[in-house]
Image: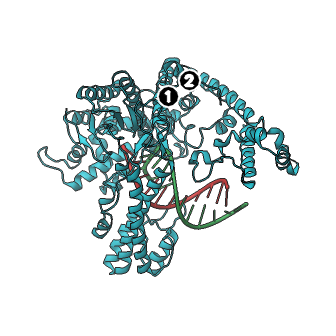
Chain colours: A cyan, B red, C green
Amino acid sequence: MGVLDWEEPSHHDFWENIYDLGSINHLFDSRDSGVRQSSLKCLAPKYLDGDYESQEVMEKLINRCRNFCRLRNAHWKIGDKKTVPQALKEFGKGDMWLPAALLKQYPDQNELRLYMNKEGKHDYELLGTVCDTYLRDDCVYTYRLAEGFLKEILEEQGPEEAEQHLEMNHALHPVIWKMETQGVHVHHDHLESSIATCEHWIKKTHARCVDLTGKDVQKFTASILRKYLFDECGLEPITFTAKAKLPQVDSDRLLLLKEQCEERDLTEANEFLSNLLANTKYTTKKQYLEGYHRVQQIGNKVPYEADFDPHQWYLFPSLKSTGTGTTRFSSSNPNSQNIEKASNPFEDDFDDVKEMLEQSPKLRSIFGPAKGDWWFPMDYKQLQLRIFAALTQEDSLIQSFRDGWDFHNFMAHAIFDLPENQKATSAQRRVAKAVNFGFIFGASEKKIDETTKKPGLYQELMIMFPNAKDFLDETKEQIRETGIVYTMGGYPLKIPMRMSPWDGRLNYAAHMGVCYRVQGTEGEIVKKAMVNTDQYCTTFMEDSRIVMQIHDEIVFKTPERPSKSHIRNLRSIMENAGTHFGVETPVDVELCQHSLDRKVTVIL
DNA sequence: GACACCAGCAT
DNA sequence: CCCGTGCTGGTGTCA
């Protein structure tokens, strides 16, 4: 819009002068910055008296303009529902230029005036000013909010602390900007052939489902499924959905229902379920693939890559550094943090299902370096658990990491009191894993006892790890007093108060607090690592950069095979980010030349 | 069309 | 009542 000079946004001086209301707001109240609540539209009415009417007026007018164009088949390039990404769909932000352009260029102004001013409206007069008004309000509200938040933050949290947190996000801006504009390379042909494979199998399995059930439906929706399985076949529902209390029909439940079929010799229903499970897998895959296909672009947004090939295809995910209540990143359009792992379809399935899934395309192989490039993902080994150990200051846990234990095995040994030279069984390890994840996800006493099927285990653990117990009590106390917990770097996180801690559910809130402190510290560490590794890349490794961030993993790109010393340096930068916050965190490195799922582990 | 719910994917 | 944080897309209901 001509407000900022976009010529050299990668230049250091440029970023020096950028302050981000999102970061300031998140520091003021980490619950504000969720996906739904962070926009000015929500913040202005909440903290100022502004109702932000001008945005609404603009949205409506833009939509009227788009309708006007559609009705007349005018040759205006209008954002189309199928091609405009989700974020732009809402109110046609992509068409902000439209009102002024119509006023300036539409040949029959009289016609335009009649349309805009019909039914007593005066929209024609607004065409030339509506976006300016919006933009002005946007600036004013942004400034006033920032001013207000900063004042509160400095008073409540102290200037030095606050400055540190703000500086971290400040330093992240150019890093995120680079990632967002330079994008993630995808293998375009592979994408298309994978979609075709999915389609083939979807058709095949669906046809079989129709045959077996005699239901000639386009799709086996949840309601059709419930009717068939529970009413017609007489199977017993396993569990019920949270709100509507209907029988759950997710994959796990369907697998259990399949067991019921085997017991009762319902061969047709049994085979139906197999086909349906395979069908669901392929349908989901296709959905992901089509999502990637829809938003991919030829890499013309890559102004800084020297020998850039216009035939390469890229995705440009949007990153929100304040997209979560815990300081983790969120990613959208597409979400680059939930790319399916290859192992996913082949575990815990029945043999016939496995067979049908054998040709299933691997989504991770869609992503990979462009020709000639190298990617190397570097991930923190069991970062969350190490943070938990550091937070609790539980010596035995910290020591087990130092001694190089597999942590789940270590926990299995502790729980089942195994001698050191005896190997834990896979069942024992599974229990231990459930306990570990339970803790970092903030499970309650009841939940831990239930998922491990060992009543009383939680209490045993509390005796076994007294510091962990103290840590829980301390977190609980913090929540009772303030509703706020702190990460290891001192970042304040608000616990959602939808469950009031004073009505007997304080324990639950306390476990939430554990989760927030662990995830919050994780986010903090990885953000610092990103800033520092980016700095290293720009300084010492030409044309290298961060491609993606997946919570405890950073994927780098280089135009040639990275040297061992570069990898070593990057690794220690990442590890130092951990120790800076008091966590010992070794980092694993892998190299890939073709795609994310064909990695070579590097041994240094 | 807006909204709630459900499902499925990740760390 | 509840093991967390996210994003996306489909279905079904309501206005």
Q: Amino acid at mark 2?
A: Ile
Badge 2 marks a residue whose secondary structure is: loop
Check disc 1 and give the amino acid type: His
Q: Nearer the viewer, residue A161 or A463?
A: A161
Whether A99 is drawn above or below A423: the answer is above
Residue A527 x, y percent position in the rendering:
42, 30
Residue reaching furthest to the right: A120
Q: Nearer the viewer, residue A474 or A389?
A: A389
Location of the N terminus of chain A by quadrant is top right
Q: Earlier in the sequence, mark 1 or mark 2?
A: 2
Q: Residue A534 in the image: state x and y as whole percent.
A: 39, 27
Quick check: A367 left or right of A332? left
Dot 1: within a 10 Å radius of its alpha carbon, few (fewer than 14), some, or many (20 or more) residues? some
Where A235 sits versus A106, above or below?
below
Q: Nearer the viewer, residue A223 or A464?
A: A223
Residue underneath mark 1: A173
